[in-house]
Amino acid sequence: MSSKRGPFVYGSYNFVRKNPAIDFARTAIQDSGMSLKEIEQNGGGTVTTLRKWLYKDARNCRHDTWVATIKAAGGDVGVLMPKSKTWAKLPSKGK
């Protein structure tokens, strides 16, 4: 007996068009005033990847590339710890 398998869907995280994280990256890039080439040179995603996120049909992004892009634009990424309610920042490059 074969079962039809649809796409994997997270029960608590659904998006219809684009992953909302892409909008955070767009805002960080715009606020930085940097070009996509400058973001790439600072260690972010490649220009091609960023164009796909921002202007093409990419619906999702890899977390490691997303973090690198946010940090290359001068932003910061962290996690709000559930029990302590403290903000734990991800370590900087080389630390």
Image (cartoon, rainbow, N blue to C red):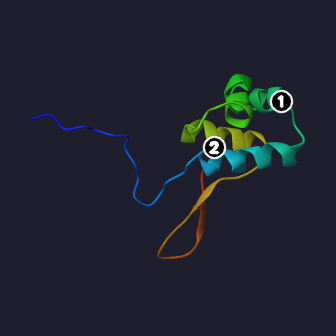
Residue 65 in the image: above or below residue 16: above
Instruction: Please state the total of marks drawn on the protein image.
Output: 2
In the image, taking residue 81 as reference, residue 20 lies left or right, namely right
Q: Residue at x 74, y 33 (%)?
A: 55
Q: Which residue is mark 2?
A: 67
Q: Residues within 10 Å of mark 2 (few under 14, many from 20)?
A: many
The answer, for residue 58, to whether it is visible in the render is yes
3D distance between C-alphas at marks 2 and 1: 16 Å
In the picture, measured across the screen, residue 17 lies left or right of residue 73, that is left
Instruction: Tell me the element at label 2.
Output: helix
Q: Give coordinates of residue 44: x percent, y percent.
A: 70, 33
Which residue, as the protein is rendered here, is positioned at the far top? 48
Disc nearer the start of the sequence (2/1): 1
Quadrant for the N terminus in the image: top left
Residue sitting at x 73%, y 36%: 54
Residue 94 appears in the rendering: no
SS at circle 1: helix
Hey, what amino acid is under mark 2? Val
Residue type for callout 1: Glu
Residue drawn where x is 39% and y is 58% of the image: 11
Say which mark, if any, is on residue 78. Answer: none
Quarter of the image for residue 4 reads top left
In percent of width and height, residue 53 lies at 67, 35
Residue sitting nearer the eye, 73 or 29: 29
Q: Which residue is outermost to the bottom?
A: 84
* Mark seen at residue 38: 1
